[in-house]
Structures are given as structure tokens and as C-alpha cells.
Image (spheres, rainbow, N blue to C red):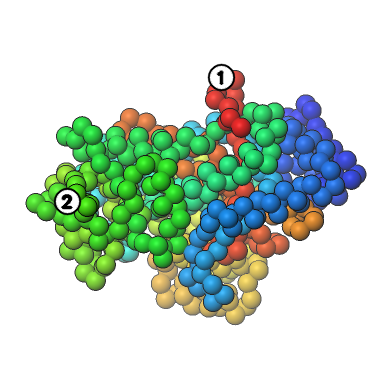
Amino acid sequence: MSQQSQSQTQSAPHPQSALAGYDTGGFFDELVLQGGQSRPDSTALINLINGLAPGELFRRQNAIEKALYQMGITFTVYSDDAGTEKIMPFDILPRIVPSILWRHIDAGLRQRIKALNMFLSDIYSKQEIVNDGILPRELIDSAPTFLPQCMGLKPFNDVWCHVTGTDLVRDDTGAFYVLEDNLRCPSGASYVMQNRFLMKKNFPQAFQSSQVRPVNDYPARLYQMLREMAPPTVDDPKVVVLTPGMYNSAYYEHSFFAQQMGIELVEGRDLIVEKDFVYMRTTDGLQRVDMIYRRVDDIFLDPEVFRSDSMLGVAGLMRAYRAGNVSLANAPGTGVADDKVIYAYVPDMIEYYLGEKQILPNVPTYVCLREDEREHVLKNMDQLVIKAANESGGYGILIGPHATDAERKDFADQIRKNPRNFVAQPTLSLSRAPTVFGDKIEGRHVDLRPYILCGKDDVWVMPGGLTRVALRKGSLVVNSSQGGGSKDTWVSAEPGQTIAEV
């Protein structure tokens, strides 16, 4: 399938416009062609920008940044000595995804989440994919995210991953690749909601003319899915959001979705298990809880089963879960499926469980546990991106071409000591998008995290997602903890599809 639609109406920037002199730098640009003309689906947006009075675009960017402070849209960086509470940087220039390309992404993500759910059901029961020699047993036995305590679990409808955030990147040809899967407690969807709110206020005309699909129904869809996946014996299930508390990096998101769904935000101390049922403490006494959208990591969920020193979870929660008296989204144990070594085998999973070829390819990946691939990695560290198997947030990564000799040597020593913990990938020429910096616009590298909801009968992919942008010039790391920001993502609607209201 071609991933680039051909231009029929193109727009070149006016000499005095904010985009005058914008340089794509030889990269695939999300809005602008190499000659400075707009891509077909971005023409309305580019025309609007070109028509703004001098300085108006930058004035609106500043207004949005002030609004973010007033709205308290924050995240936490634990390692930053200058202060942990940060405002999520936001860029006013959205990313636009053509409808035909989104159709391809949607199909690929649906396929992927189906296979991953089947893998989790299998790996915590018969382990047929291991017994048939598709996945080496050593990878499962050595995976810190594989939880033997979850063997034999049977989530309702065999859905383990109710909420998934899959990271996509685009190379210099415009092709999309899956960079990684996030199946435990994926975060960021609240920023999608707030980014869209801010953009509607600042570019209402561009929304109408660009025919953008909505994302504001995500909280309602999330709530409906959670109710569907509660124990089937309950007619009117009680749903809560379980948070580690206000000092967690994603606490803003936890409280945001609890408020949007109209449900209680609880901590472990607010819940109790009696006779294998979960109850919430209220001023009117105990109230039964049927579905927990948990934002607490697996090993802290239940001190009876996982970490005995956990103060974040609920003693007896896993007993209630095994008894079928409460549902958890996502199911505990899902972390094994987003191990970066296991990721390399997802194309094999798709073929094994579904009998299909992958629609969205993985980034080519070298598994350092394999001797021949490890030797290739060690000899070519200056050309590769090397990742620790279970790190996140942009940590545990070596970008070989940008690293020093000392940094490469340190990673080489770590690989030799623990080859199971590392994979390597070629350094992709990631796509870029125009991004506002002060009173100018420059290209910055981006990725895309769509959010997928998996319910009883269907998989739904948010039409858009969180476009993360590397705000540091030349950086390939987009994570907010590493100085990255975000953009609104506009998916163009096809005829008959719902259009976002302004």
C-alpha cells in the first residue's frame, strides 16, 4: 500500500509567513514537502498559518503555554534536581495523518493487539508457542516481567491488554514501523485530550476545513469498555481508578480520567478484600468494587502475592481476581509482552496465532542473546541504537552515532555481562515536523503513540494519539522525561466518518 497520497493542491509559504525559509533538512516531514510546499492534507492548515499576521502564531503559542500552567497539566521527573513537577511542553503546530494512511495503521494495530492478547493467554497457560519452538523458553524464564504468580489466570473474555499504547515511528520513506508496545500502565492519553482542547480554541477554522476526526469520546469509550469487562455476574458494575498517589509521575492523568468518567479515584488504602470480594471504604460503609482500572505496577498490586513491602496495593486482591469477583485492567503479567526482547518475536506471534503476515512491521531488531547478532552489535555500536530490555521513559538507551567512545565501551561491557538484557536497532532517519521555538519554526523528530482499547467483542483504535516531539535539536529521544514535548494529531476523515466539533 502506498503511504503517501499525491498532491493536487499545494501551498508554498508566503515570503513573510512563519514558515518562510523552513528547511526540511532532507528528512521526511509530516506537513511540508522538500520544496517547501504543503502536503495535500495539510494545505488548509498551512494556508491558515501563512495568512496570520506577523507574530500571531508565536503569540498563540505563548498563550497556550500560559494556559498549560493555569490548567496544571503536569508530569513528574524524579531524577531532575531542579524540581520534579513539570508542565508538559506543547507545540501549536499539529501533525496531520491522511485518512488512507490511518486505515493502514488502524488495521495493523488491531492485528497486533489481538496477537498479543493470544500470546499472554498462551504464555500463562499451556505455553504452546514455546513448546512449538517459536519462542525460546530461555527468553520467558529469564524475563523479569514474566510473573509465575499469574500462571493459570483467566481474565474475562481472554482479554489481558484492555488499554495499550503502541509507539510508532516513520522513516525517511514515510513508512511506519512499530517501535515498542506498552501494555502495563500506558500513559499519555490525557495529554491527547487536553492538546485537542487547546487546539480547538486556537485554530477553530483549520479544524473545520481540515475535516479532523474526534478524539474526545475516548473517556466514554474507556468507561464503557471497563464496564463490559467487569465480572459478567454483575448488572451495574462499580468501576474505580487505582492510583499509587499524588507523587506518581502520571497522577494528573489518573485524576483526569477518574473525573472524566465520573468514577472514584482510589489508593490502595481505600480498598479492602473480604471473603474474596473487593470493597471501597466510604462514609456510608463498605461498597463493593467490580472493575479496577489500575495504574499501579504489577509487583505493587498485592503484598500477599508480589512485593510484601508494598504500601500501594491491596492485600488479597489477587485472591479476589482469581475467584472472578473483580476485574483488573490491564491484567497483571502483561509486562512480559512489552519486554524489548520479546518484542522482536511479535511478527512470529502474528503468524503463529493468526496465520497472517504483519501489517505494521517492527523496526529490524538484533537480539543480543543470540551470539551471531551480539557480535554484529558489538562490532557496529557506532551505527546502532542499543536498548535495555525493560527500561522505559528514554532511559537505558545508547544512540551509537551520537555516543562517545567511553559510553559505547560501557554498553559493550554491559552487553557481554548480560546479553539477555539488550537489543539493538538500526538508527532510523525519523520523520520530522515543524515546531515552534521562540519566534521561529524548526523541524524536530517525532513519534506517535495511538491508544487501543480492547473490549469483549471489538478492538478500537483512537483516531490520532499522542505525537511526541524531541525538542532538543537533532535529538531522537521524544520522551517527556528526556525533555520531549507533544503535539495534537489530526487524522483526516473519510466520507461518512464523524468530524470533530469545534
Of mark 2 and mark 1, the one earlier in the sequence is 2
Q: Is residue 332 above or below residue 219?
A: below
Residue 8 image position (x, y, % from top left): 78, 26
Q: CA distance from mark 2 to mark 1?
A: 49 Å
Which image quarter: residue 428? Answer: bottom right
What residue is shown at x 55% (from left), y 53% (from top)?
A: 71
Q: Secondary structure at mark 2?
A: strand
* Residue found 41% across the figure and 35% down from its top: 221
**Which mark, residue 208?**
none
Mark 2 is surrounded, within 10 Å at the Cα level, by few (under 14), some (14 to 19) or many (20 or more) other residues, namely few
User: How far across and how far down the image is residue 201, in percent?
Assistant: 64, 40
The residue depicted at 70 percent of the width and 61 percent of the height is 474
Pick out the residue farthest to the left: 275
Q: Are marks 2 and 1 in contact (CB under 8 Å)?
A: no
Which residue occupies the foreground of this view, 51 or 407? Answer: 51
Q: Quick one: 111 or 127, which is closer to the camera? A: 111
User: Does residue 187 appear to the left or right of 80 in the view shown?
Assistant: left
Which residue is label 1 attached to?
Answer: 496
Disc 2 marks which residue?
A: 285
**What amino acid is at disc 1?**
Gly
Q: Nearer the viewer, residue 442 or 363?
A: 442
